[in-house]
Amino acid sequence: MLLFRYIWVKMWQEIAKYGRKLVEHGLVESSFGNISVRAGDKMLITRSGSALDEITEDSVVEVEIEGTSSLDLIASSESVVHREIYRRTQALAIIHAHCPYSVVGSLRAKKAGKTSILPVDSEGQYFLGEIPVVMGGIGSRELAENTALALSEHRGAVVYSHGTFAVGKALSEAYVVTTQLEHSCRVKYLYELAEPREFHR
Ligand SMILES: [Zn+2]
C-alpha cells in the first residue's frame, strides 16, 4: 500500500512538472490541454478544466483504459483520445497541447491539400519525419481513432485547427516531442514567410 501511494505521488508530481513547463513555454494556455501517464491497465489523466500550471493531487484522476468508469465525468474531455492511443500504441505517456505554430501549420497544410506537415529543419526531419495532420472534433470517436492510428507510426501529430498530441515512454519524452513539433512548425512558418517564392516553386 505504501509503494502504491509512493508511485501515485510520483506520477501526479511528474504531471504537474510538465504541466508547468508547457504553460511557461507558451505551448498551451493554462486551462487547456491535458496530460496522462499509463499505469498498467489504467491511466492517470488531468481533470477536465484543470489549470496545467497549478496541478495538485486533486487535479488528476485514475480511469480504466479498457471500458469506461464513473470518473470519466470529471476526467479530461479528451480521455477518449488518450485511451485509444494507449490501446493501439506502445505509449506510456501522452501530452496534448495547443501549440500555436503547430495549429497554424495544420491549417496551412489542409489549405494546400496535404495530410501532413513536412519539417524543413534537419532536426525535425530526423526526429519526426513527417508530421501527420489528423481530423476530428474535440473528444470525438473519429478524433480518437485518427490520432491513435497516426501515433502508431509517429511520435507526434497535429489535430487540424486544434493542437498537438505527443507520446513517449515517459512524460519527459512526450514533452521533447511536443517542443520539437512546435519548433519545426515555427521554423517552417518563418521560412515560408522569408522565402515565399522558394517554397512555392
Ligand atoms: Zn485540446
Image (spheres, grey):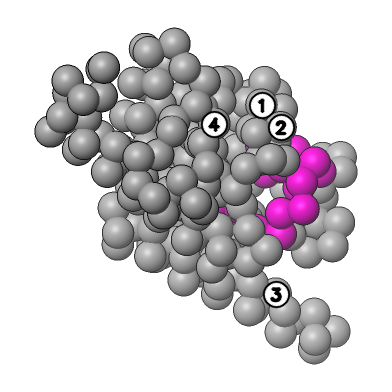
| The one of 170 and 22 positioned closer to us in this rendering | 170
Label 1 neighbourhood size at 10 Å, few (<14), some (14-19), many (20+)? many
| Residues tagged 4 and 2 counted as in contact (Cβ below 8 A) | no
Residue tagged 4: 132
Tell me how far mark 1 sits from mark 2, CA to CA: 5 Å
Q: Quadrant of residue 146?
A: top right
- Tag 4 or tag 3, which sits nearer the N-term? 3
- Tag 2 or tag 4, which sits nearer the N-term? 4
Residue tagged 1: 146
Residue that protrudes farthest toward the bottom in the picture: 2
Q: Which residues are magenta?
A: 81-95
Residue tagged 3: 8
- Tag 1 or tag 3, which sits nearer the N-term? 3
| Residues tagged 4 and 1 counted as in contact (Cβ below 8 A) | no
Q: Is residue 166 left or right of residue 5?
A: left
Q: Is residue 87 magenta?
A: yes
Tell me how far mark 3 sits from mark 1, CA to CA: 30 Å
**Could you say where residue 25 lies in the image, as x and y percent from the top left?**
30, 59
| Residues tagged 1 and 2 counted as in contact (Cβ below 8 A) | yes
- Tag 1 or tag 4, which sits nearer the N-term? 4
**How many discs appear?**
4
